[in-house]
Amino acid sequence: MTGRTLADALRWAEHGTSLFGTRVALLDETSMSAPSLLPGWTRKHLVAHVAANADALGNLVHWARTGIRTPMYSSARQRDSDIEQGATRSAADLLAWLDASVQALSVAMDSLTGDDWRREVVTAQGRTVPATEIPWLRAREVCVHAVDLGTGAGFADLPGEFLSALIDDIRAKRGLDTRPRGPLPEVAAYLAGRPHSLADVPDLGPWL
């Protein structure tokens, strides 16, 4: 498992948030309605997902701060419905939602104390983790999905230490003992089920 720290995750989440937000801000109604790199999703679906994820992680921050059980989503159906409904909104509305959710999550995480960060919460996948995992969950979302927008950002635009941590995380979740050889960004892209340049490697299917 990676030796990443809370400070690392917070820094990577900030980097990914900036990268994602900068790319989205350049999109107009037509370009945001265009397909993303994720099959079946437009860029509007992707922006709605990232905004809804910030709101959902905000629920975990509230749980960590108050001790009151507050799941990320009421159900998987609610999660999917939020994304589908969000994808019907205008580009301006989606950008406003994204900005508001990002700001709210940042303020909420800034309010956590040392004891709060150690409190256990439960992810949407049912894993019980310390609240220190929340920034890492956000970093993965914003960094990887900044690439999925298909506006020119690639895994090579992400911090090398983040890519190493991401590779460790995905390998653990996929149960892979070995790591393929190749440039760090390409290995991360391959393990994440995204387009890559590695040769003679088996298809792993989608992740995240």
Image: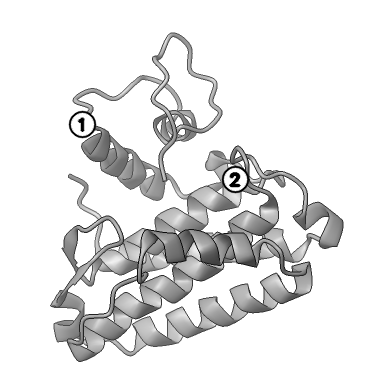
Which residue matches tag 1? 175
State yes or no: discs 2 and 1 in contact (Cβ < 8 Å).
no
Q: Nearer the viewer, residue 89 or 123?
A: 89
What residue is shown at x 77% (from left), y 73% (from top)?
A: 92
What residue is shown at x 40% (from left), y 43% (from top)?
A: 163
**Disc 2 or 1, which lies upstream in sequence?**
2
| Mark-to-mark CA distance, 2 and 1 | 24 Å
Which residue matches tag 2? 148
Left or right of 204: which side holds 122?
left
Q: Is residue 103 visible?
A: yes
Query: In the picture shown, does residue 151 fall above or below 119?
Result: above
Q: Nearer the viewer, residue 23 or 164?
A: 23
Pointer 1: residues within 10 angstroms few (<14), some, or many (20+)? few
Q: Secondary structure at mark 1?
A: loop
- In which quadrant is the N terminus drawn? top left
Q: Position of residue 37 (x, y in %)?
A: 63, 40
Seen as rendered, the residue at the extreme front is 77
Pointer 2: residues within 10 angstroms few (<14), some, or many (20+)? many
Quadrant of the rendered image containing residue 76: bottom left
**Amino acid beneath label 2:** Asp
Left or right of 28: which side holds 150?
left
Query: In the picture shown, does residue 154 fall above or below 82?
Result: above
Q: Give the total number of marks visible in the rendering.
A: 2
**Amino acid beneath label 1:** Gly
Q: Is residue 12 visible?
A: no
Left or right of 208: which side holds 147?
right
Left or right of 77: which side holds 149?
right
Q: Position of residue 107 (x, y in %)?
A: 43, 87
Q: Secondary structure at mark 2?
A: helix
What residue is shown at x 30% (from left), y 85% (from top)?
A: 62
